[in-house]
Image (spheres, rainbow, N blue to C red):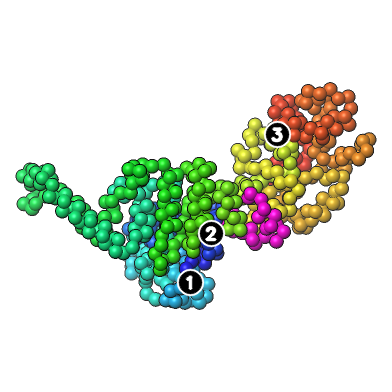
Amino acid sequence: MNITKIHIENFKTFKGSFKLTLNKGVNILVGDNEAGKSTIIEAIHLALTGLHNGKYLKNELSQYVFNNEVVAEYIQGLEQNNTANPLPKILIEVFIEGEETAEFEGDGNSEKAKVSGFSFKVEFDENYQKEYEDLVKLGGIKTLPIEYYNVSWLSFSRDESITPRAIPIKSALIDSSSNKLQNGSDIYISRIVKEFLESNEIVEISQAHRRMKESFMAEEAIKKINEKIKIASKISDKKVELSVELSSKNAWESSLMTYLEDVPFHYIGKGEQCLVKTKLALGHKKAKEANIILLEEPENHLSYSKLNQLIHDIKNDSGEKQILISTHSSFVANKLGLEHLILLNDKKTVRLNELSEGTYKFFEKLSGYDTLRLILCKKAILVEGDSDELVIQKAFVHNNEGKLPIEKGIDVISVGTSFLRFLEISEKIGANVAVVTDNDGNIEAVKNKYKNYLGNNAKQNIKICFDLDIDTGSIQDFNYNTLEPKFLKANSREALNKIFETAYQSDDDLQKYMKANKTECALKIFETQETLNFPQYILDAIKTDQ
């Protein structure tokens, strides 16, 4: 059993409708901060459990779980017309498949398709319509009136409300970035431990916990203390005494604490916590329960070796479980397989297996590092090699008050000759990209290569930058239309001799030196404090107003 698709409306990051199809096995969410990775994981966990930040949302409902823009538009609408406008709602639809899902099958979903699943809703309770209208008449509403909201679950079969207990898929949320504590115990480890246990084992723990109370109350020291409290108490005539919490059926959950090597769980390193939680979740063996494991940036707090261990465990022990991972780590993406990668950008998604066959196979064989850099930056400048990268970096610093591109969210990426592969991704996700390329003495060939991005086919987010002049010289079989000759053309032989600590008497000799020592020359250009000029096509590429 697994989740096939989720549909999110107005929950946190997502304004309006957002849909995401999931793989049966591993799913890797990659995107910049605020792209929605965490929101997706939170939404799934919330819909499956009713929990948000370790607490039941129905008891801790806040307007801040709604999309900020949606709330602002609602408040603005009230101020403008002072009428009882429809209140915004949160909808999370979970589409499922597998055995024992027949009772959830129906067309009660946003797609009106006959499939299995359920809806989680946070919406206005119409029983409060009169109270809401009276509140609006009073005016001055500055926040969402959440006291009139209701939290509910409804299967696609259009049955009456269901509860999380009826949902056949269970989730384990593992977030190494923070601890959620209840009575000193980590909420998530406690929940994972509980799910790991069989029903008879839970009964045995409860009984042992009850015997602990009896033993506690029988202690002579406790008897003396309670007698002292009884004598000193002036609150009432009724008995006041110390005891152990047993008032609820599952009192043991909040009073027991997990230890690792005799150290309370929440005191150990967060990296080790992540490993333990993941292994326990992977080890869940209840036959009729299909777990989805939700991992928030597992690379946090983990060394290279520990991260490698974690990924090894995920790959080898996941079995039939569905796994959803958010990450900024190319290592994680590469190790778990680029075919599982879901790229998030501006609420849009793209998978590498949705690219052309040639591009998909190309990236499948790479580490994925450059791919992630393209996704995670505000703008990418694609260059061919290391020397180009250094010169572009210098040009940017020179024209941006000493700031490196990365300080402005711009990443300069060396991609060899694979510009078109990266442009295919950027076109799909709308990433801002500038290509810096040599014309190699054949402008028509450049225009033909990038015909899908020039002229009438130009894309707002993609800029192709190359020199429009074809230069020639006296050296036979020498390409005067690459970076080095163009850079010399923009400056002078005297200036570059000074930077390179050379003494060439002709431009041709200097150009041959620069070609033979591309990286070394580029490094000296990057490090120099001398005033430099840059070719226009490079200046076009580094503009930040794209």
Residue located at (85% from left, 33% from top): 512
Q: Amino acid at mark 1?
A: Gly
User: Which residue matches tag 2?
Assistant: 26
User: Which residue matches tag 1?
Assistant: 98
Does 159 lie within the magenta span?
A: no
Q: Is residue 257 left or right of residue 102?
A: left
Q: In the rendering, at what x and y percent does residue 465 appear?
A: 76, 46
Q: Earlier in the sequence, mark 3 or mark 2?
A: 2
Q: In the rendering, at what x and y percent does residue 508 appear?
A: 89, 31
Q: Is residue 4 left or right of residue 354?
A: left
Q: In the rendering, at what x and y percent does residue 83 appear?
A: 42, 64
Q: Amino acid at mark 3?
A: Lys
Q: In the rendering, at what x and y percent does residue 166 appear?
A: 37, 69
First to last magenta residue range: 342-368
Q: Earlier in the sequence, mark 1 or mark 3?
A: 1
Q: Are marks 3 and 2 in contact (CB under 8 Å)?
A: no
User: Which residue matches tag 3?
Assistant: 394
Q: Nearer the viewer, residue 212 or 170?
A: 212
